[in-house]
Amino acid sequence: MSALVYSIPVFLMIALEGLGISPKSKTRKMLLNISTIAIGLLIGFPISVAIFPALTIKNGKDIEDRFH
């Protein structure tokens, strides 16, 4: 499930370095790393959660009374 979340930033960084637009300064490189991780989480996490179905389904009558 987490393979997609971890692979998106890696592919983005490889693509940027391949295009020759990877930043050279330490601060900009750190910002780029953080932004690619955020993009990976924003894109990959919902997709990986949506792939797997819910394991259990609870009826409203089966839960505790305080949740009715």
Image (spheres, grey):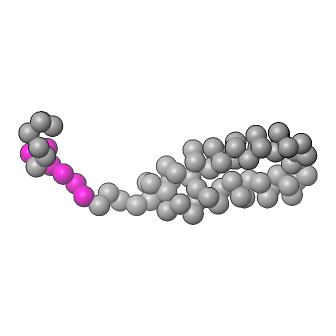
* Outermost residue to the front: 26
The percent position of residue 52, horizontal first and vertical second, equals 40, 61
Q: Write the start and end of the magenta stretch as one range.
A: 56-61
Snapshot quadrant of residue 31: top right
Q: How many marks?
A: 0
- The percent coordinates of residue 51 (x first, y second) are 44, 59
In the rendered structure, the answer to whether residue 56 lies left or right of residue 18 reads left
The answer to whether residue 25 is above or below residue 44 is above
Horizontally, is 19 left or right of 57 in the view?
Answer: right
What residue do we see at 80% from left, 56% from top?
15
Q: Main secondary structure of the magenta part?
A: loop
Residue 17 x/y as whole percent: 85, 55
Q: Residue at x 10, y 49 (%)?
A: 62
Q: Quadrant of the C terminus?
A: top left
Q: Quadrant of residue 57?
A: bottom left
Name the residue rendered at 79%, 58% in the picture: 14
Horizontal side of 16 relative to 38 (left or right) equals right
Q: Nearer the viewer, residue 63 or 8?
A: 63
User: Relative to 35, does residue 50 appear above or below in the rendering?
Assistant: below
Above or below 52: residue 32: above
Residue 22 placement (x, y as % from top left): 86, 48
The verdict on residue 63 being magenta is: no
Seen at 12% across and 36% down, the residue is 66
